[in-house]
Image (tube, rainbow, N blue to C red):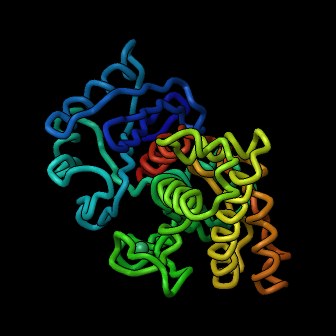
Amino acid sequence: MTTPQTNFIGINVSGTQARAALVNSEGKLIESKVAEVTPKQLTPQLATMVEELRAGGRSVAAIGVAIPGLVNRQTDRVIAPRDLPKTMVGDLHGELMSATGLRVELENDANAAAYGEFKVGAGLGARNLFYMMIGSGIGGAIILDGKLWTGASGFAGEVGHITIDTEGLECVCGNTGCLETVASAPSIVRRARERLNRDGTSSLSRLALNKSFTAEDVAHQANEGDDFALMMIERTGKYIGTGVASVINLLNIERIVLGGGVMDAGALILNPIIQEVKRRAFQPCFEATEIVAAKLGLDGAPIGAALLARDAATD
Ligand SMILES: [Zn+2]
């Protein structure tokens, strides 16, 4: 039973890192932890993080784990992990339950982050929202009438794979010209590199001095007033805005929350996104939608996973 003293743990596993959060029953963050994880040791490593957060006799009712990849909610299995080895997440659900003695819920990371923003972040006050996570990949999640809407088999919201450019590059999903192929962090770097190589004037950009620049560097230089970097960020905003306009037309949703590392560029990217949505979306839908940046940063997914575990218990 959930009492005000009961806590929940959420863990976001991404690449070689896990970020865990202990939250109270209201979703308030009490403590967080970050640890390196390795494919062969994932379950014991996560169990150790859980033990550390439970230290001092804190009562924990359940654990939520957010995974970059698709989770089948019927079988509690991770299928198609995006940036984790498949062996790493074999039967994570069952193994973590036996290692900790606690109930475990698995969820896709974008879904978890959406739920965190919805309950205690930029989604507060909305009944319906669409969340978009724009980072190394692009994920999305839909909350309708206060509940995560995961679709027929748990995979709804894959906004990164809507087609933006029918003549575009091949995507990891097999389609061509997906939003992810132009607006994810690695795609921003690729597009910037291509342009630096073919356009002489852009070599004035400070990015041309740095052979291994990242999407963060592009955002940083744009903030410093570098014209080329600014143009790259604005164009990225246009692509994202094109995707968001489709979402708005489809769902007539109350709020769009944009998170993930690419949004760290702040207003430099948010403004062109909103302009492009305004230009493309069906006007009455656009006027009914608020487009805002996420608030919880890297804690969004672990907090959301913890709250999903909390609410799964009371459903
Ligand atoms: Zn795709």
Q: Quadrant of residue 64?
A: top left
Give the residue drawn at x 37%, y 40%.
Answer: 62
The total number of labels drawn is 0
Q: Residue 261 at what x, y percent from top left?
A: 57, 47
The residue closer to the viewer here, 248 or 203, is 203
Q: Quadrant of the N terminus?
A: top left
Give the residue drawn at x 63%, y 77%.
Answer: 247
Q: Is residue 213 left or right of residue 101?
A: right
Up-down: is 183 above or below 277? above
Q: Residue 100 at what x, y percent from top left?
A: 24, 32
Q: Residue 30 at what x, y percent from top left?
A: 55, 25
Q: Is residue 30 left or right of residue 58?
A: right
Viewer can see residue 42: yes
Up-down: is 134 above or below 261? below
Viewer can see residue 149: no
Give the residue drawn at x 35%, y 19%.
Answer: 52
Give the residue drawn at x 64%, y 51%.
Answer: 203
